[in-house]
Image (spheres, rainbow, N blue to C red):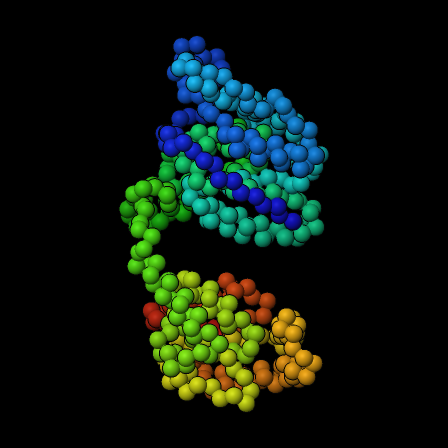
Amino acid sequence: MICSSSLRLSGSGTGTRNSPSPPASSENSDESQSQVRRIKASPQLNRWSRARSIRSGRKLDRSAVSTESRDKSGSPVLSEPEIELPMSPKGDSRSGSSDDEKEVNGGKPIFMVSDGTGWTAEHAVNAALGQFDYCLVDRVCPVNTHLFSGIDDVEKLMEIVKQAAKEGAMVVFTLAEPSMAQFAKQACQHWGVASSDILGPITEAIAGHLGVSPSGLSRWAPERQKSPLSEEYFRRIEAIEFTIKQDDGALPRNLHMADIVLTGVSRSGKTPLSIYLAQKGYKVANVPIVMNIDLPNTLFEVNPEKVFALTINPVVLQSIRRARAKTLGMDGELKTNYCDMDYVKEELEYAGKIFAQNPVWPVIEVTSKAIEETAVIVLRLYHDRKNRCSMPRISKRY
């Protein structure tokens, strides 16, 4: 089981993006200490950590609660929480940490740090955790994931790495600015925190392949901000509006205007797949196949390379139709006809004959596939055909 929470740290906008080296020894002179920038603790991070402690049943460490002091100008300053950190990157012990305590906390934490929305880090971690379903489901190795988005300065990054060291968390980060990524790596090494840079290696590899240097700008950098009313925005809105109007075989005369045409029996996933593709900017129309009802002639007149057929296992289809019929409150007679196994098989066979008569249409098996998985197959075939990819197809069934 994976418990997930997210936190967006707010900043005053005055944080520096310089990458200081990890904290030096406390044996500095008073004069040099006065020149060191004081790192302000985040009240939100402190409250979040204390809340997690309460939920997990762990006794609160009151010494970690920040106290108020004043700087030379008399302005109140939050002092840094007293966090006991390992003395070396290879330290094996942490104050208040043990295997038993980690179990009480509900799982080993993974901190995902991003200078943007955190979408890349979150999906990469979830994809990797998918390799451990065999132990996550039975809570043999439970995991807690925590997303920190919008981390655009060193002070916030320092707080998170220190918290990770205190809780024995792993830090996974996607930081576009090289200095920030380098500081995250050095700080994690200094405090013995396991870490992984997701964005850096692939960015360097692409830079080497293209022979140019990356911009090093985060997604939220002012230099990369575009008008929300861009050409891409209007294209996606137009695609969504078109797809909604063309749902379930409506307006078949407009099929030639679609980028992608989906066809299949009822409840084979045409509508949700259409909407998902539309959000990516593709105009999609879907045409249902129903026995004893003629298909529109335009379905056979459009370019067959943009038509995609969907099929599904009859047992799964019957289960979906039964659930659908129940929500619609269908009466017994109609429900039997719509959900009867013989009728389901007969309708799938009828659709299969139509597919066989149109061999250019790829037949995609959607049973046990998520919408995203089916969309990947459709878009791969769509772009292969559009770009006239020469790679041979192993099978016509996907």
Q: Where is residue 323 in the image (x, y as percent from the top left)?
A: 65, 71
Number of disc labels: 0
Q: Can residue 355 be seen in this view?
A: yes
Residue depicted at 65% across the width and 49% down the height: 1
Vertical position of residue 228 compared to residue 368: above or below = above
Relative placement, left or right, of 195 versus 222 is right
Residue depicted at 43% across the width and 15% down the height: 74
Vertical position of residue 266 compared to residue 61: above or below = below
Relative placement, left or right, of 108 versus 310 is right
Residue depicted at 40% across the width and 31% down the height: 12
For the residue pair 327 and 274, the one nearer the viewer reads as 327
Q: Can residue 319 be seen in this view?
A: no
Vertical position of residue 42 compared to residue 33: above or below = below
Q: Where is residue 308 in the image (x, y as percent from the top left)?
A: 45, 75
Residue depicted at 54% across the width and 52% down the height: 127
Q: Where is residue 267 in the image (x, y as percent from the top left)?
A: 57, 74
Relative placement, left or right, of 55 versus 85 is right
Q: In which quarter of the image is residue 244?
A: bottom left
Q: Which residue lies furthest to the top in this view?
A: 30
Q: Position of residue 9 (x, y in %)?
A: 47, 36
